[in-house]
Amino acid sequence: MECPEIQRAQIVASYLSYQYEPETEDLNRALIASGKELLLPRLLPDNDLEWVSWGGDIGQLKENGKIKEPKGPAFTNEVQIDVVIVPALHIDQKGNRLGQGGGSYDRALHRLPAERSWKIGLVGSGELTSEKIPVEPHDEKVDAAATPELIVRFRNLRALE
């Protein structure tokens, strides 16, 4: 919550963690409490993602397999997203992330303007690796990674406006 990119953000896309992913509930609630618009992902039939605004009401979530997704209309102005908090299994020293393998986040991140939307991957301790992660041409890098102990930046901090 204290990093400058999140401090100055108005629209933040996050996710609802499950199983062994770093917990996002407290972070999501803090984002909402700070007055930011929080977007959560919804999986489409073609495995792409769309974003939906969520105000914290558990009743506005539905089960989709092992994950919960927001109900409601899709957020259609993706270029306005300031920060995207991304799940990852591992992230390497160059910002390459290993996800679940479906490419959903890669497609969603590709549509965002790199100069505006800061992408940070959440990983557990020991999941930030010095080993190179294999990449495909469609894979999207993150700008930073956060573990419970630290934030590592892979691109220079953008100038504050």
Image (tube, rainbow, N blue to C red):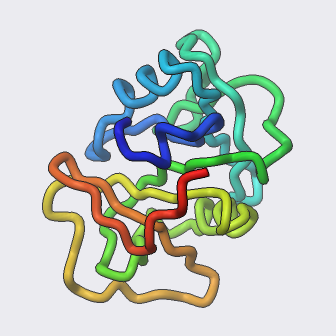
- Report the side of 114 relative to 22 (left or right): right
Q: In which quarter of the image is residue 91?
A: bottom left
Rendered residue at 38%/26% (across/down)? 25
- Report the side of 134 relative to 35 (left or right): left
Rendered residue at 64%/28% (across/down)? 37
Depth check: 62 or 39 in front? 39
Q: Is residue 72 above or below residue 74?
A: above
Depth check: 41 or 6 in front? 6
Rendered residue at 14%/63% (across/down)? 126
Q: In this view, does 140 lie above or below 112?
A: below
The mark total stands at 0
Q: Where is residue 6 in the image (x, y as percent from the top left)?
A: 48, 42
Q: Indicate the quadrant containing the N terminus: top left, top right, bottom left or bottom right.
A: top left
Rendered residue at 23%/68% (across/down)? 128
Q: Position of residue 31 (x, y in %)?
A: 48, 27
Depth check: 11 or 76 in front? 11
Q: Where is residue 16 in the image (x, y as percent from the top left)?
A: 46, 35
Q: For the view shown, which residue lies furthest in the front direction?
A: 161
Q: In this view, does 35 lie above or below 63?
A: above
Q: Quadrant of residue 94?
A: bottom left
